[in-house]
Image (tube, rainbow, N blue to C red):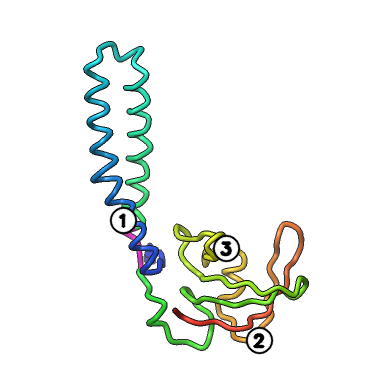
Amino acid sequence: MSNETPITKEGYDKVQAELDHLIKVEREELKTTIAEARELGDLKENAEYHSAKEKQSVVEGRIMQLQGVIANAQVIDPKTVSTDKIVFGATVTLLNVEEDETVVYKIVGEIESNMKEGKISYKSPLGKAVIGKEEGDTVIVKAPKGDIEYEVESFEYI
């Protein structure tokens, strides 16, 4: 079984950019800060040193996380997808039946999901519910405050 995790090209580029920044900028700045703090003497009571070491730990953890994402990424360009069903990368227009409200979401990888940007993970309850559906299908999503019924109005790969 493969460990590959789907991610859009846009999401992959964002992760790569953050990783490059952390390695080339943050890591180097922290090395300098730690070296300068070390020169101040007694490390037991050196707040700058301890703060920089703590930040370094956070940065290194994030670098490792992002390297893992990159290593396992299966980059999918939604523009190359051709199917009459909803799959990863689709931009889906849904009608919330109870509220008579239309919502648009793009189905993306977990690391790139962001509700404010209208990007939902393929592993989210709504993401799971719409994958494999077609225009006109109804989906029921189990939500904390009760089931929500959506109708698939349209979808496209952009």
Q: What stretch is highlighted in magenta?
A: 70-74
Which residue does the numbered mark 2 point to in the structure image?
A: 136
Q: Which residue is drawn at 26% across and 45% down?
A: 23
Q: Is residue 43 left or right of residue 35?
A: right
Front: mark 3 or 1: 1
Disc nearest the viewer among 1 and 2: 1
Name the residue that disc number 1 marks. Answer: 17
Q: Main secondary structure of the magenta part?
A: helix
- At 70% from the left and 61% from the top, the residue drawn is 143
Question: Above or below — where is 101 with respect to 145?
Answer: below
**The magenta stretch spans residue 4:** no
Q: Quadrant of the N terminus?
A: bottom left
Q: Mark 3 points at which residue?
A: 124
Q: Dot 3 lies on which element? A: loop
Q: Kindly indicate the quadrant of the structure image that contains residue 138.
A: bottom right
| Residue 85 horizontal/vertical position (percent) | 53, 84
Name the spot of residue 14 as percent of width and height, x first: 36, 59
Q: Quick one: SS at disc 2?
A: loop
Residue occupying the point 55% across, 82% down: 155
Name the amino acid type tagged 1.
Ala
Return the x and y of residue 107 as percentages of the image width and height: 51, 70
- Please tell me whether mark 1 sits on a helix, a strand or a loop: helix
Measured Cα–Cα span from mark 3 to mark 1: 25 Å
Q: Is residue 73 magenta?
A: yes
Q: Where 128 falls versus 15 (above or below)? A: below
